[in-house]
Amino acid sequence: MRIGVVSDTHDRQEAVAEAVRLLLEQEVELVLHCGDIESPDTVRVFKPIPTHFVFGNWDKDKAKLAAAIKDSGGTHYESFGALTLAEKRIAWVHSHERHQLRQLENADYFDYVFYGHTHVREQHRTGRTLVANPGALFRANPKTCIVLDLITGEIKPIIIPGKLPGAAVPTPHAATAALDDGTGSIVMPPGVLPDAPSPPPASS
């Protein structure tokens, strides 16, 4: 069984749509979202895959998000989520309230704990628990999510294009527009690479 883990999508719907497409290519059966969704429109992009959401500090209107999640066939959890899949105990949290992540990580109960908020992909082990951040689809270079194979234990990073060929440029959230440089790093699938920047003129 394969699952996808994403976080910090922050209304970047083109990036979310590409992530969903790539996760479907990886044959994931469900997705865990570690929070900072921002709007119901972003929730609806996850409709092709059963998705379990937790809320982050940017998820201000939880009632509207919860309604969109229900309408899209997803499930939401207030502070952290927990599931048992393929006999593995899994928890996920946004982690802006750091004590929640520490409690889950040090409980010596879960096989996997996923978290977001930092926009930095990383993973480490604490006792029996593998702790991982999938990265983010906003303010991350590159933009990433991950796929976990629950049978083999393999975690595979998925790189999302920074700018999708032919995609319209979305209107950024007003509060975060100045922080989004719109750049990714490596474009997936291969063969679609951004133009290299022109070198600066030589000084005389």
Image (cartoon, rainbow, N blue to C red):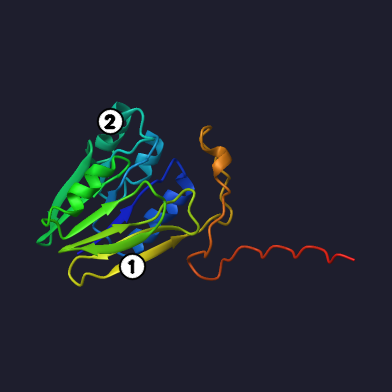
**Would residue 171 be seen by someone viewing this image from the given angle?**
no
Q: Quadrant of residue 197?
A: bottom right
* Above/below status of 196 relative to 58: below
Q: Is residue 157 left or right of residue 126?
A: right
Q: Is residue 180 left or right of residue 11?
A: right
Q: Quadrant of residue 122?
A: bottom left
- Identify residue for label 2: 67
Image quarter in which the N terminus is found: bottom left
Image quarter in which the C terminus is found: bottom right
Distance between the alpha carbons at the discs numbered 1 and 2: 31 Å
- Identify residue for label 1: 156
**Would residue 178 be seen by someone viewing this image from the given angle?**
yes
Q: Residue 109, image x and y in percent? A: 10, 56
Q: Quadrant of residue 21?
A: bottom left
Identify the residue at horizontal 58%, vertical 48% (top origin). Answer: 181
Q: Is residue 75 left or right of residue 39?
A: left
Give the residue type at disc 2: Ala
Q: Residue 143, image x and y in percent? A: 46, 56
Outermost bottom residue: 152
